[in-house]
Image (cartoon, rainbow, N blue to C red):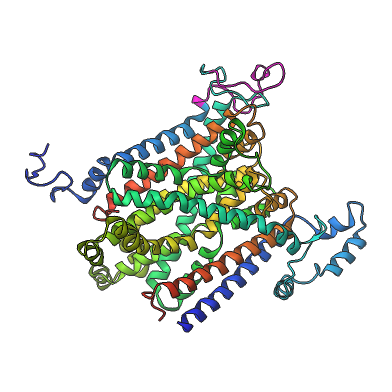
């Protein structure tokens, strides 16, 4: 067990190092020069050169990469000369809104997926099952920002039920629902097939044979064990979820990391794009690690060898 | 028909006569699957629309028509009259239907090209890793694991945003170059399963070289699975392109893209809701078509894999 955790830990560190290196090397090509941003358009070449030297931009690429690693290890993601703020402080400012939306979105996904998945499996091949299968095929195909726009149009604007954007408690409903409606489809499919698999097992027959109510068999015996692949997918899904949040936050002007990334793209702000990508990618890798470890504790069948 | 094919009465309809070639069995299974056929039809129609765009678009998608807006400068709602702003106009007086038809070109081009690039890289890495084994396999698969751990859309955005003069080719190259990892994983698994089978040994005994074994014997075996995954990936790549265009870092102006149309529509949704409805519907149908086709191909390739 400890060996398993250690191996996952080492692997996580390697992945994060790769993320830092790739983001740095890619961003090195970005067509924005911090020296020019600081000095303004009328600076002399000498001024620019001295600012570049002060920022260490004149050093060789490999050395800068090594220095950058050191910087990141000290929790410094660099200074954003476009926004005149440290990158990390901007990220930390936007982070709570994204976490809030992400939690609400996952809750939406599960609230939609669990009842539908269970009913589809229990009433297999009934009309409910057929409708569900069609709906989940359609759900996967829908662009999340389009669903968001439609919710904004119909539930926000025409029906006036929710705010048309911005950060507020009722304002989280529509963006979370957009991610939930499109994301739930995969969970429905996974839960349904895993329920069907568990239903065939002997212990379920035993539970029925000893006279337990069908409701108890379904929820206590089948559902709980069928949840394992759902939890696995929850961990794998984080990267995809983040992608959905980036576009959804843009639709609803939700002041999280996605909206920040949009500003960064608009300003061709290399430092911020780089910091955001690195921070979010690393966060996802770490969360995957956490999910794997929790999972190893929960499911004794996993081999740690 | 059944007498011709020698199918005994007692057999259920899904059982196929062993006298049919595997290819014919595959075709029959595919065409008996309603959703799969629907997906195929959607894909064929979209490809036709993309190819024939200059001939079927009723108006010029880039032209700003003076009669395309109201005297107050507002966009026109759908008129349902062909050639007269059938699906309405945008705030500059451009025809939405014609833009939609031309937008299919970008979606299809990026969807297919990005997938081709991803599949080509993934096949190469997967074949080499699976066949070589040992250290080569280990190194290649660790790299694949790292790429799989990257959040896809974020890295597409990062890589795309550092390229200053983008073309449509930039967009599909970026999506393709970052999307090979799943194909590599799948290909390697299939190669591992196939490489120790007797026919490969027989080919080796007959003196076939590594390249020949890979190309003639292993590639055809992994192709089925890769085609299924590739078809699903086309759908994903179409959505990725539209998301990039939606975030204004997709295909460059003035090229029409469904994602860009939705961005524009979002600015006018309160007065001109049709601007977001049509391009989104087109995107959903395109992605649904490829998803259904991929699922159908998968079912037809593996008849026993039920759910």
- Residue visible at 11% across and 42% down in the picture: B5
Front residue of B188 and A116: A116
Of residues A249 and A51, which is closer to you in this image? A249
Please tell me whether residue A80 is drawn above or below residue A66 in the rendered image: above
Can I make out residue B167 in this image? Answer: no
Q: Position of residue B278 (x, y in %)?
A: 53, 31
Residue B258: image location, x then y, percent: 56, 37
Is A256 placed left or right of A286 in the picture?
right
Which residues make up the magenta segment?
Answer: B55-79
- Which residue is found at the position 42% from the left and 68% from the top? B128
**Residue at (54%, 46%) from the top-left corner?**
A177
**Which corner quadrant of the image does residue A24 belong to?**
bottom right
Q: Is residue A77 magenta?
A: no
Q: Position of residue A164 (x, y in %)?
A: 65, 39
Specify whether residue B14 is in view: yes
**Which residue is the extreme one toward the bottom?**
A3
Main secondary structure of the magenta stretch: loop
On-image quarter of the N terminus of chain B: top left
In the image: residue A103, left or right of residue B221: right
Residue A36 is left or right of residue A78, and the answer is right
Is residue B134 depicted above or below B64 in this figure? below
Numbered marks: total: 0
The spot of residue A150 in percent (x, y) is 56, 36
Q: Is residue B275 above or below residue A240?
A: above
Q: Horizontally, is A43 left or right of B232 in the view?
A: right
């Amino acid at each position: 067990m400890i060996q398993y955790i250690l191996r996952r830990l080492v692997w996580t560190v390697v992945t994060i190092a790769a993320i830092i290196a790739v983001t740095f090397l890619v961003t090195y090509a970005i067509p924005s020069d911090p020296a020019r941003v600081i000095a303004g358009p009328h600076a002399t070449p000498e001024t620019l050169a001295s600012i570049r030297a002060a920022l260490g931009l004149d050093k060789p690429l490999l050395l800068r990469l090594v220095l950058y690693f050191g910087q990141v290890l000290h929790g410094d993601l660099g200074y954003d000369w476009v926004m005149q703020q440290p990158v990390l402080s901007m990220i930390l400012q936007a982070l709570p809104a994204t976490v809030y939306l992400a939690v609400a979105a996952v809750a939406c996904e599960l609230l939609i997926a669990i009842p539908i998945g269970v009913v589809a499996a229990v009433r297999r091949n009934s009309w409910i099952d057929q409708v569900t299968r069609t709906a989940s095929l359609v759900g996967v195909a829908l662009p999340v920002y389009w669903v968001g726009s439609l919710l904004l149009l119909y539930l926000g604007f025409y029906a006036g039920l929710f705010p048309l954007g911005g950060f507020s408690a009722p304002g989280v409903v529509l963006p979370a629902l957009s991610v939930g409606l499109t994301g739930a489809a995969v969970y429905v499919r996974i839960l349904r097939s895993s329920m069907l698999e568990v239903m065939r097992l002997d212990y379920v027959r035993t539970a029925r044979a000893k006279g337990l109510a069908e409701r108890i068999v379904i929820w206590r015996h089948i559902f709980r064990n069928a949840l394992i692949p759902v939890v696995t997918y929850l961990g794998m899904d984080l990267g995809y979820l983040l992608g959905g949040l980036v576009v959804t936050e843009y639709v609803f002007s939700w002041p999280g990391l996605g909206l920040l990334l949009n500003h960064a793209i608009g300003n061709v702000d290399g430092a911020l794009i780089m910091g955001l990508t690195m921070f979010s990618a690393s966060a996802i890798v770490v969360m995957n690690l956490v999910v794997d470890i929790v999972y190893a504790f929960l499911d004794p069948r996993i081999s740690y060898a | 028909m059944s007498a011709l094919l020698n199918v005994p009465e007692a057999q259920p309809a899904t059982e196929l006569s062993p006298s049919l070639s595997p290819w014919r069995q595959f075709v029959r299974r595919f065409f008996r699957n309603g959703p799969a056929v629907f997906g195929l039809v959607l894909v064929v129609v979209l490809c036709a629309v993309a190819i024939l765009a200059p001939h079927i678009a009723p108006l010029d998608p880039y032209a700003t028509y003076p009669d395309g807006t109201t005297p107050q400068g507002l966009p026109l709602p759908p008129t349902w009259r062909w050639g007269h702003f059938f699906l309405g106009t945008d705030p500059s007086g451009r025809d939405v239907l014609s833009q939609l038809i031309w937008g299919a070109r970008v979606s299809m081009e990026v969807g297919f090209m990005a997938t081709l690039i991803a599949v080509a890289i993934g096949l190469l890495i997967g074949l080499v890793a699976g066949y070589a084994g040992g250290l080569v396999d280990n190194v290649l698969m660790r790299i694949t694991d790292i790429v799989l751990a990257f959040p896809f859309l974020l890295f597409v955005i990062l890589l795309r945003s550092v390229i200053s003069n983008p073309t449509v080719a930039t967009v599909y190259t970026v999506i393709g170059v970052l999307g090979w990892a799943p194909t590599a994983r799948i290909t390697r698994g299939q190669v591992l399963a196939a490489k120790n089978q007797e026919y490969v040994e027989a080919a080796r005994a007959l003196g076939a070289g590594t390249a020949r074994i890979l190309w003639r014997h292993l590639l055809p075996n992994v192709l089925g699975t890769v085609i299924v995954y590739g078809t699903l990936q086309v759908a994903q790549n179409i959505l990725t392109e539209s998301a990039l265009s939606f975030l204004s870092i997709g295909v460059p102006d003035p090229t029409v893209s469904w994602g860009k149309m939705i961005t524009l529509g979002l600015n006018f949704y309160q007065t001109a809701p049709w601007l977001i409805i049509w391009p989104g519907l087109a995107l959903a149908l395109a992605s649904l078509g490829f998803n259904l086709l991929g699922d159908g191909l998968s079912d037809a390739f593996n008849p026993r894999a039920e759910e």
